[in-house]
Image (spheres, rainbow, N blue to C red):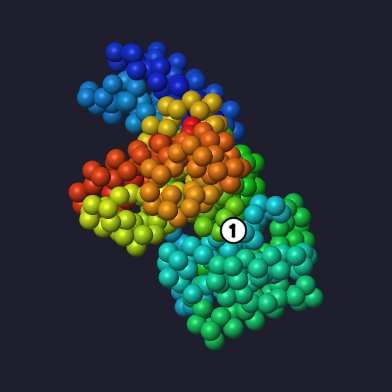
Amino acid sequence: MFDNLTDRLSGTLKKLKGQGRLTEANIQETLREVRMALLEADVALPVVTDFIAQVSERALGQEVQSSLSPGQALVKIVQGELVRVMGSANEELNLRTNPPAIVLMAGLQGAGKTTTVAKLGRHLKEKKKKKVGVVSVDVYRPAAIKQLETLANDVGLKFFESDISENPIDIVNRAVEAAKRQFVDVLIVDTAGRLHVDDEMMTEIKALHAAIKPIETLFVVDSMTGQDAANTAKAFHDALPLTGVVLTKADGDARGGAALSIRHITGKPIKFIGVGEKTDALEPFHPDRVASRILGMGDVLSLIEDIEQKVDKKKAEKLAKKIQKGKSFDLNDLKEQLEQMQSMGGISAMMDKLPGMGGISKSVKEKVDDRDLNRQIAVINSMTPQERRFPDLIKGNRKQRIAIGCGQDIQAVNRILKQHQMMEKMMKKFTAGNVANMMRGLKSNMRGMRV
């Protein structure tokens, strides 16, 4: 996420490391490069101008601590300004109303609106323990109604039926009444994609908004459209009283222009950010965490939250107790760890959240392939139950049979065995059987992945 911007900013700020102190000359030289990095990231010009002015003023003011090196001082200032531009903190959804709380989703065609409805519904159901219903008023695209029904069933949301022959206001009014009877806490309304220059379609959504009075009106926008995302969001906000923005497809956005432009241009917060295609790939937008990731400093808090939510704690505790009792860490245990990593989105999803990843070269990052996890699991699946329990049995002919069974070469089998040995040694050092130790195991396993 935002790799190009991260590379440029990290490289630019590193150049100050050898300087004795911050001066107007070296600040201005560095900020010229920062300005270019932001413009190349497709950040809107007014945002860039304001950003550079604020950083320059703070860097030349009294905020630089003598205990910091020039590079550290400017990184601290730049990070603070990135947070200010994107919003000081995450702004949660306001659901404080008589249920059902209505959330209206608006946006352009192809922005990922219907998928985002399902993602948001899952987030509210699993993280906020809400009973969530969804309804589609996209009467122009029959497939959209069916798509939402399928997604709702997949993640356990209540789906309220609709038909292309109906009026959108009638659809929602009926869904609201049904939601009240079924004690639904939140009703998410998926609307048709529309252009802000389409007067007829904009009139329709204004009328819908006025009729149902949603407590939240979220604009869903593709982050890969850069500053155009911010301009489109502003146009929609001029027509509708938006309460926030959801940025989609951020995992494919190497620039970051949308994230850095939207708050400044619209005055509305980014509330969520989509980081993948699966229905669990939606994160609350934390400006401070995103700023750290942009500067290559990682996002440990989000990583910890991922671990807390996605790692099977019962399996982790079971393994920890097993190791405590002096039993060996076998290949079945390694397979479980690889599957845990898969559930967290794989190595690539975790890389930009780990501190220090900004220093890893682009060529190395490009070699990371999450399919390696599937290949490694396939190698273990090709072993007999006895071989998984007693890896020392695996030699010569056994290796060849396992390699043929999983369609890989013997080197792949050797890599798994070496990785197992490394993990086994580390597991023996555990003294306290708890989930925290299991997390260290996961992190060590990441280092063992081929990059």
Using the rendered image of the protein, determine whether residue 439 is visible from the camera's viewpoint: no
The total of numbered circles placed on residues is: 1
Q: Residue 295 falls in which quadrant of the image?
A: top left
**Which secondary structure lies at badge 1?**
helix
Residue displayed at 42% across by 67% down? 128
Provide residue 118's location: percent of width, then percent of height. Answer: 58, 63
Provide residue 337's location: percent of width, then percent of height. Answer: 41, 50
Q: Amino acid at mark 1?
A: Thr
Which residue, given by chain and number where applicable, does mark 1 sit on? 116
Q: Please give left or right for residue 407 compared with residue 381 in the image.
A: right
From the viewer's perspective, is residue 265 above or below residue 364? below
Q: Residue most toward the left?
A: 431
Residue displayed at 62% across by 47% down? 222
Provide residue 429's location: percent of width, then percent of height. Answer: 23, 43
Provide residue 437's location: percent of width, then percent of height. Answer: 28, 49
Using the rendered image of the protein, determine whether residue 294 is visible from the camera's viewpoint: yes
From the viewer's perspective, is residue 160 above or below residue 304? below
Mark 1 neighbour class, 10 Å CA radius: few under 14, some 14 to 19, many 20 or more: many
Q: 133 or 419: nearer the eye?
A: 419
Q: Residue most toward the front?
A: 397
Residue displayed at 62% across by 50% down? 221
Q: Residue most toward the bottom?
A: 181
From the viewer's perspective, is residue 128 above or below residue 48? below
